[in-house]
Image: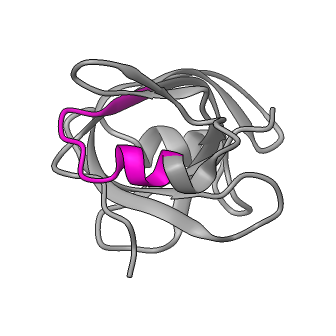
Amino acid sequence: MNGNKIFISLDGTSTPLAGTKSNEIQTECEAIEVTSPLTGVWKQHIAGRKGWSFSTSWLVMPNGVSGTKLRDLLRIGQTYTVRIYERGSSNTLLLTGSALCTQAKVTATRGNLATGAFSFVGDGELAIPQ
């Protein structure tokens, strides 16, 4: 898994509920690979897009967030802050936006890994942080 890191947190907070590495972000007319090696080009390409979404089958929860707590916090119909960081060990924030949770089903947890079905639909544009 060498994709960019996507973190999901409650809207208005910086503490993540969970993170994932997604293969692509869907937009209205195309799927954009998150794992593009041309990070700068990719970032400029996706910034400002409306109608974006992403889905994943697993989430990594930070310390202190259990599978039970994730079930309580991650709710369908709630808006979350989504932050996309550069892949690898870098903590460089590439893009940020808000997304509506459309699917949140935790099927199993093991350690800090939750598996299931998680889908988010962008609520506005993805922005490049200043």
Quadrant assignment for the C terminus? bottom left
Does residue 120 appear in the picture of this structure?
A: no
**What is the magenta range?**
42-54
Q: Which of 33 and 16 is in front in this view?
A: 33
Q: Does the magenta stretch include residue 46?
A: yes
**Residue toward you, 27 or 104:** 27
Question: Magenta span has 8?
Answer: no
Q: Quadrant of residue 33?
A: top right
Say how the picture is coloured: one colour
Q: Where on the picture, by quarter, is residue 52? A: top left
Using residue 123 as the reference point, say whether residue 43 is left or right of it: right
The x and y percentages for residue 127 are: 31, 62
**Where on the picture, by quarter, is residue 106?**
top right
- Which residue is at a point 33% across and 31% down the rendered structure image? 53
Residue 31 x, y percent position in the rendering: 41, 20
Residue 62 point in image, percent of width and height: 69, 58
Q: Which residue is drawn at 83% across and 62% down?
A: 89
Count of marks placed on residues: 0
98, 34: nearer the viewer? 34
Q: Residue at x 21, y 52 (%)?
A: 125
Residue at coordinates 33% horizontally, 52% vertically from top-left?
A: 47
Quadrant where the N terminus lies?
A: top right
Is 47 placed above or below 58 here?
below
Which residue extends farthest bottom? 130
Vertical comparison of 7 with 36: above or below: below
Is residue 60 toward the left or the right of residue 47 in the image? right
Image coordinates for residue 42, horizontal then vertical, percent: 51, 45
User: Is residue 45 at all visible to an observer of this figure?
Assistant: yes
